[in-house]
């Protein structure tokens, strides 16, 4: 698999290099030279397979002979140990539930697959530092995927006070090779610190820097697999009129879905659903890219004003000659989000703010004859306080949350100052 840097097309790397490097020069994202177009008969065959077998074939088609299909099958078997069920909400709308993994969020798929690929790619004695920013769920998925791995240190930045308490408990109570830093600023500041670190060549070399954000290609490719899993669970007559609404923050999930469509998966169209941080919906409406300052919302994992993966979306549309105006979009404020959570619950489906936004925008835009699917990206209990407040009912805690809820936080709070972060990163390597 060959990939190129979107900011410098002369920088070309293999899949293994892209996994280990994370970002290219000028903070450019890596993107595949080719997205294989799979014949419809083969896709039909794939859709009849089990999740792990099909996923290894999808990833093999994308990655090529750099990793054998046998090796991929073993790695996927280790990573994807939980289901992604489609649950009907009404006659023509269903949820793709992506929160049945160990940290109850869709990021378990990408985080665990990336951990497997990095373990495969690194030399036995090579030391790696994974630096990643999280607006909520990435932190837990990455922390748990890499927890206890030899010679791999993980440093996670998150905006202080801007993720849910239970999200924080999931990854800030581990210790060991996991360091968590609460940044006294917003998520975009966290992301900026990560990019700054990647620009520091001396630091990068000294600590073996890598990132596990959705900028890492291995995470993105893993997410392609559950779109196929969703379609596999639908009756034949619903597959050809499928519209998928994706709750969008950094736009990695939408990028993965578009790659699935580019491979030939029958998806009629996508909808990008955001909260008040609506840079992309406003851009699609006006053609003007004008990010506002990020605001804190109920759907905090989507509190991103400058989504990292958007250049990949534009590149894929350009390469496939798809018109950007075929991408649906919508944005909800917090009041509308609360109404959506209540409305969804009235249909017998308890959800959380991110999925509720995707559902609401989907139901507003679904046309006659179409079948709608929205992504359930996190278990509602991860947003226990806000969901209970909105619905006036108590949510039981699933086991992964219950066992960490009373543990002390091990995070340190720092300012959004790169020199402070740099010192911590160098120190973490010298002590491990």
Image (spheres, grey):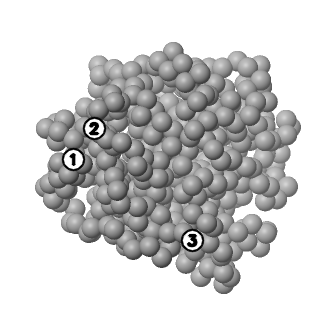
In three-dimensional space, the C-alpha distance between marks 3 and 1, rounded to whole angstroms, equals: 32 Å
- Residue, disc 2: 127
- Residue, disc 1: 429
Numbered label attached to residue 92: none
Which is nearer the N-term, disc 3 or disc 1? 3
Residue at 51% from the left image edge and 43% from the top image edge = 112
Q: Position of residue 129 (x, y in %)?
A: 29, 44
Numbered label attached to residue 402: 3
Q: Position of residue 423 (x, y in %)?
A: 14, 54
Left or right of residue 317, residue 23 in this image: left
Left or right of residue 379, residue 50 in this image: right
Residue 259 in sight:
no
Which is nearer the N-term, disc 2 or disc 1? 2
Residue 363 in sight:
yes
Circle 1 — which element? helix
Quarter location, residue 10: top left
């Amino acid at each position: 698999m060959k990939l190129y840097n979107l900011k410098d097309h002369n920088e070309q790397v293999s899949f293994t290099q892209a996994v280990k490097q994370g970002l290219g020069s000028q903070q450019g994202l890596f993107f595949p030279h080719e997205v294989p177009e799979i014949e419809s008969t083969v896709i039909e065959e794939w859709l009849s397979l089990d999740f792990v077998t099909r996923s290894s074939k999808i990833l093999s088609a994308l990655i090529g002979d750099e990793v054998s299909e046998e090796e991929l099958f073993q790695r996927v078997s280790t990573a994807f140990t939980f289901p992604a069920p489609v649950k009907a909400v009404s006659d023509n709308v269903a949820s793709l539930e992506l929160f049945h993994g160990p940290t109850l969020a869709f990021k378990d798929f990408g985080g665990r697959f990336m951990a497997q690929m990095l373990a495969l790619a690194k030399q036995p004695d090579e030391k790696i530092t994974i630096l990643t920013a999280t607006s909520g769920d990435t932190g837990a998925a990455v922390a748990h995927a890499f927890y206890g791995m030899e010679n791999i240190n993980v440093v996670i930045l998150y905006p202080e006070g801007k993720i849910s308490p239970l999200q924080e408990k999931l990854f800030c109570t581990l210790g060991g090779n996991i360091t968590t830093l609460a940044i006294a600023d917003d998520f975009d500041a966290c992301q900026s610190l990560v990019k700054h670190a990647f620009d520091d060549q001396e630091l990068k070399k000294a600590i073996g820097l890598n990132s596990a954000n959705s900028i890492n290609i291995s995470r993105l490719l893993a997410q392609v697999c559950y779109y196929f899993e969703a379609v596999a669970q639908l009756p034949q007559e619903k597959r050809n009129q499928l519209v998928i609404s994706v709750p969008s923050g950094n736009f990695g999930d939408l990028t993965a879905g578009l790659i699935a469509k580019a491979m030939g998966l029958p998806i009629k169209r996508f909808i990008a659903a955001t909260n008040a941080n609506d840079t992309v919906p406003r851009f699609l409406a006006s053609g003007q890219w004008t990010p506002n300052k990020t605001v804190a919302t109920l759907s905090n994992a989507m509190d991103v004003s400058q989504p990292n993966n958007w250049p990949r979306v534009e590149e894929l549309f350009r390469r496939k000659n798809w018109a950007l105006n075929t991408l649906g979009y919508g944005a909800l404020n917090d009041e509308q989000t609360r109404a959506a959570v209540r409305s969804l619950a009235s249909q017998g489906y308890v959800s959380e703010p991110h999925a509720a936004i995707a559902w609401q925008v989907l139901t507003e835009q679904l046309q006659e004859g179409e079948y709608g699917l929205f992504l359930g990206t996190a278990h509602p209990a991860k947003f226990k306080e806000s969901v209970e407040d909105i619905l006036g009912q108590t949510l039981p805690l699933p086991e992964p949350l219950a066992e960490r809820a009373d543990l002390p936080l091990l995070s340190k709070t720092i300012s959004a100052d790169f020199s402070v972060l740099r010192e911590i990163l160098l120190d973490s390597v010298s002590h491990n």
